[in-house]
Amino acid sequence: MFTIKTYKTAEVAKLVGLHPNTIRRYEEWGLIPTPKRAENGYRIFTDYHIDTIRIARVAFQIEVLQAGLRRQMILVIKALAAYAFKDAQEALDRYIALADREMKRAAEAITIVEETLVKKEETAHIELTRTETANKLEITTDALRNWELNGLLTVKRMKNGYRVYTEADLKRLKIIRTLRAANYSLEAILRLLHALDTPKKLNIKNVLDTPDSSEDIVSVCDKLLTSLEQAKTNARKIKKEIDQLEKKYGQSL
């Protein structure tokens, strides 16, 4: 047995390095157990609250959104808030499996891009409309328009103003389609396309996973492979911490 220490909201905030309002948000979102109240209405927190908050901070340090990864991690933390250690571990196992799947998809996309780049272009002259191009690539015209607006592709126009997509455009679009399907960000894809326009020999994986120093804002998917690997590392760390929580608190809850 051990003595249960109690803390006020401000004390918890100071210990975990968060604003008191954030602690209250954790309570509202169900990420920590609902604290008991003192006679004066003040919340009474325990070491378990502090431990779960610290785990939650690790859990959401790398917020990979695709494939339901963030939702899955929320289930992990909410299970801990309910003292359901087994449920938390099972949800964490599913999270790691999802991260593995996303890493596999990301790696496979790189292989497809490499194969696309070495494949010889057709000799036949091709000029397709936006709709014809979308149909051929099995994507929407809205996706095409979005990629063009984001600078991934510049399409020449005929005298009547209509866009014309060539074989080279199709090859570029296949690369974009493959990488977007694997959840690479538009910024990462644009970085690769710019690199492909240079005569240098490229390591596609490194280009996709290494934001340029000139980029003001870098998101998780701008360095997808690194982010997924870090998310898995954090998940394994959380797995060990949940074991420790269960050993520490399991008999007293």
Image (cartoon, rainbow, N blue to C red):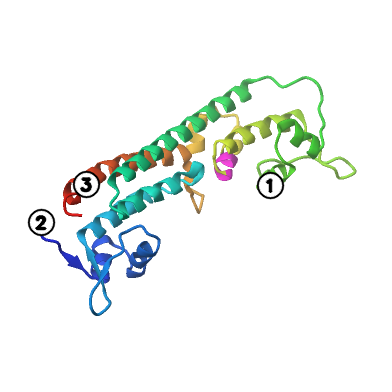
Residue 246's label in the rendered image is: 3
Q: Residue at x 26, y 59 (%)?
A: 49
- The residue segment tinted magenta is 186-191
Q: Residue at x 72, y 33 (%)?
A: 169
157 relative to 6, above or below? above
Q: Is residue 165 left or right of residue 219?
A: right
Q: Residue at x 37, y 39 (%)?
A: 232
62 relative to 121, above or below? below
Secondary structure mostly seen in the magenta stretch = helix
Q: What's under tag 3, amino acid-wise?
A: Glu
Does label 2 or label 3 sit earlier along the sequence? 2
Say which element carries label 2. Answer: loop
Asked if disc 2 and disc 1 are in contact, CB closer than 8 Å, the reply is: no
Location of the C terminus by quadrant is bottom left
Q: State the separation of the CA atoms marked 2 and 3.
A: 14 Å
For label 1, the residue is 146
Does label 2 or label 1 sit earlier along the sequence? 2
Is 155 included in the stretch rendered in magenta? no
Task: Categorize mark 3 by other alpha carbons within 10 Å: few (<14), some (14-19), many (20+).
Answer: some
Task: Categorize mark 1 by other alpha carbons within 10 Å: few (<14), some (14-19), many (20+).
Answer: few
Q: Is residue 203 left or right of residue 238?
A: right
The image position of residue 214, as x and y in percent, is 51, 49
For label 2, the residue is 2
Q: What's under tag 2, amino acid-wise?
A: Phe
The image position of residue 212, as x and y in percent, is 50, 44
Say which element carries label 1. Answer: helix
Q: What's under tag 1, amino acid-wise?
A: Asn
Say which element carries label 3. Answer: helix
Asked if disc 2 and disc 3 are in contact, CB closer than 8 Å, the reply is: no
Location of the N terminus by quadrant is bottom left
